Image (spheres, helix red, strand yellow):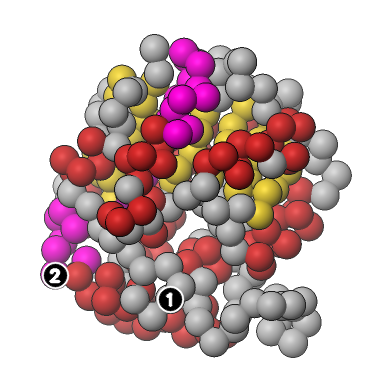
Amino acid sequence: MTDGTAETGGVDLSRPSAARVYDYYLGGAHNFAVDREMAERAIGLWPDLPQIMQANRAFLRRAVRYCVDNGIRQFLDLGSGIPTVGNVHEVAQAAAPDARVVYVDNDPVAAAYSENILRGNDLAAVVQADLRRPDEVLDSPGVRALLDFDEPVAVMMVAVLHFVPDEDDPAAIIAKYREVMVPGSHLVLSHASQDGQPGQADSHQDLYRRTATPMTMRSRAEVTALFDGFDIVEPGVVYFPEWRPVSPEDVDDHPERFTGLAAVGRKD
């Protein structure tokens, strides 16, 4: 994607977007020069960043397969960014063709490109909305058309809650979604953490203060507390590669270098 060809109506291209920076880390093409500039600055400070983001995406894929294996056929992906290769609908529908997926993101560029990517897929949709307003998300036509909250649902909050500051009370936001989730539903969550590499984490948070979505990293105890009302499935709250790896070789001797925590909880 080139900046000149993008339809940016109303989008502030003077500030990078977390969704588009993440797309760049994953090798996507749905980003602007300002996003690429920030990503390269971040990689200069922290060369492992692309690998960290890829490990987070690998966790997402494993978690979606886990949910499908446990009977989940509908997914609400909050703060989804741009659904590039290997995202929720591809993984879920490959395992269960009847799986239904709704992506939610408040970035207008992410939402617009998501609509293009999902065109022709009647079981996947995108809603431009802010996950911090659960009532608006849950009452949106896109969500109501595809998801039935009388059945179990997987609510995905993957690499997004670290963009929700403490004053917005992420635990209360999760509780609003939990209220509509029937038993058997799952919460899939990953979160940036200063655990493991606090020095680099601090510089990364400083860099994200340039964006419209500053970052708040949280500890393992803080991330665990976000699962209030859910039973956390094994292996608990762990670094990205440690969550149900496909092979033991997928976890190296220093998983803490990924500085991101992941877990899945079940509502009983």
Q: Residue at x 14, y 63 (%)?
A: 198
Q: Which mark is residue 211?
A: 1
Left or right, 177 with respect to 102, comes to: left
Q: Are marks 1 and 2 in contact (CB under 8 Å)?
A: no
Residues at marks 1 and 2, CA–CA distance in whole angstroms: 20 Å
Left or right, 159 with respect to 145, comes to: left
Which residues lie in the magenta part? Answer: 176-201
Visible residue check, residue 6: yes
Residue 149 lies, with reference to residue 134, above or below; the image says: above
As shown in the figure, which amino acid type bears the numbered disc 2?
Gly
Quadrant where the C terminus is found in the figure? top left
Q: Position of residue 102 (x, y in %)?
A: 65, 40
Q: Residue at x 59, y 83 (%)?
A: 13
Residue 182 lies, with reference to residue 76, above or below; the image says: above
Quadrant where the N terminus is found in the figure? bottom right
As shown in the figure, which amino acid type bears the numbered disc 1?
Thr
Q: Position of residue 163 (x, y in %)?
A: 39, 59
192 drawn magenta? yes
**Label 2 SS:** helix
Q: Position of residue 118 (x, y in %)?
A: 76, 48
Q: Position of residue 179 (x, y in %)?
A: 46, 25
Q: Earlier in the sequence, mark 1 or mark 2?
A: 2
Visible residue check, residue 69: no
Check disc 2 and report the residue beneath it: 199
Q: Which mark is residue 78?
A: none
For residue 257, which quarter of the picture? bottom left
